Amino acid sequence: VGSGLLEELDFRQEADNAKEFAEAHSHIPFLRVPRSVPQYVTERVLTLEWVDGRKLTDLPPPDQRKMVKMGIDICFSQLFSTGIVHADPHYGNMLYDNDGKLVLLDFGLVTRVTPEQKEAMAGSIVHTLDEDWEGLIEDYRTLGLLPSQPAIW
């Protein structure tokens, strides 16, 4: 994500990220990613199709639950299937459109998850449920959350 901060300043990269993300997740019928208008995208200008939608906080509770469930399903698809991850998924970057779809916005920060990292994330869930703490530690090392060798104080 850190290396993506500089790329986030170039809207051409953001448009490419959105297109790649949309293509990778096209199997999800309730996901919508606004399309860019390529002839009006430059390093400093991003032009997207207009999407009518409401924020999570503006929805009635049943629609809020639907939107959250869709968001969780999309997160699982990113992390465990496609490996292409929207790295800024807060509620300000999501809308619920008039067709009942979850619209993701702001693709300035997108990262890729390797097959090894996907396996380690799945393993960390299993190891936590099994209370296999040594396995969990190895998963965290694979994910880069822990050093390969413990620090000695």
Image (spheres, helix red, strand yellow):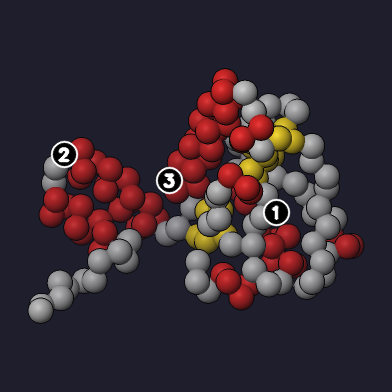
Q: Alpha-carbon distance for marks 3 and 1? A: 20 Å
The reply, left or right, for residue 69 in relation to residue 126 is: right
Residue pushed farthest top? 62
Residue designated by label 3: 80
Q: Earlier in the sequence, mark 2 or mark 1?
A: 1
**In this rendering, does residue 77 appear at all?**
no
Where on the picture, by quarter, is residue 18? bottom right
Mark 1, other Cα within 10 Å: few <14 / some 14–19 / many ≥20:
some
Q: Earlier in the sequence, mark 3 or mark 1?
A: 1
Label 2: state its secondary structure. loop
Which quarter of the rendered picture does the C terminus lie within? bottom left
Residue pushed farthest bottom? 153
The reply, left or right, for residue 124 in relation to residue 35 is: left
Q: Position of residue 42 (x, y in %)?
A: 82, 70
Q: Position of residue 73 (x, y in %)?
A: 50, 35
Label 3: state its secondary structure. helix
Q: Amino acid at mark 2?
A: Asp
Residue designated by label 2: 130
Toward the viewer: 114 or 103? 103
Residue designated by label 1: 19
Q: Position of residue 149 (x, y in %)?
A: 17, 73
Q: Is the residue 64 above or below the residue 77 in the image? A: above
Q: Residue at x 61, y 35 (%)?
A: 57
Mark 3, other Cα within 10 Å: few <14 / some 14–19 / many ≥20:
some
